[in-house]
Amino acid sequence: MNRILLLSLAGVAGTLTRYLVSGWVARRFGETFPTGTLVVNLVGCFLIGFLYHQLEERALIDPALRTAILIGFLGALTTFSSYGLQTFTLLRDGEFFLAGFYVLVSNLAGFLLVWIGYNISRFTTVAS
């Protein structure tokens, strides 16, 4: 139960960090381009790469705390960091085809599903 509580608290911290940082960046640099989201995603990618090596491969901390940081905090901060790490580990393990497939499908299908969801929402009346 402690692991779940720790994971939940880290998730809340990651969510709040994402909200505050992306909002601050958006206000500072404008909202025409999603700079706030881009900054959060790129920082999250850097952090998950750095912390994965430090916490997973060197095992410097308790596994429950490691899970809270990598999955809870960074997962809530940005799922893009998990995507980056998963792509990296596929490449590191020599799974070049799978890494390319994952990148291609994630980006194309992700964009397509955003477009589909948007358009379904646009043309659907929600009863209130």
Image (cartoon, helix red, strand yellow):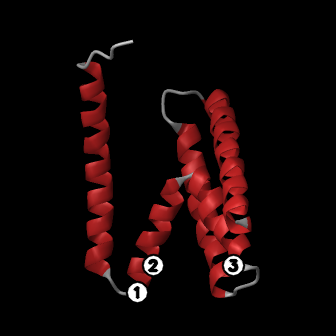
Dot 2: few (<14), some (14–19), or many (≥20) neighbours within 10 Å?
some
The secondary structure type at the circle numbered 1 is loop
* Residue located at (30% from left, 44% from top): 111
- State how far apart marks 3 and 1 are (Cα): 23 Å
* Residue located at (23% from left, 19% from top): 123
- State how far apart marks 3 and 2 are (Cα): 19 Å
The secondary structure type at the circle numbered 2 is helix
Residue type, mark 1 in image: Asp
Residue type, mark 3 in image: Pro
**Is the Cβ of the residue at disc 2 closer than 8 Å to that at disc 1?**
yes
* Residue located at (69% from left, 48% from top): 12
Quadrant that contains the C terminus? top left
Instruction: Tell me which numbered mark, 3 or 2, is placed earlier along the sequence.
Output: 3
Camera-nearest residue between 61 and 48:
61
Residue 17, horizontal then vertical, whole percent: 70, 45
Rendered image: mark on residue 59: none
Q: Is 85 on the left or on the right of 66, as rendered?
A: left
Dot 3: few (<14), some (14–19), or many (≥20) neighbours within 10 Å?
few
Q: Is 112 on the left or on the right of 24, as rendered?
A: left
Q: Quadrant of residue 62?
A: bottom right
Q: Is 67 on the left or on the right of 81, as rendered?
A: right
Q: Quadrant of residue 124?
A: top left
The secondary structure type at the circle numbered 3 is helix
User: What residue does disc 1 label?
Assistant: 93
Rendered image: mark on residue 89: 2
Residue 79, horizontal then vertical, whole percent: 51, 55
Camera-nearest residue between 93 and 59:
59
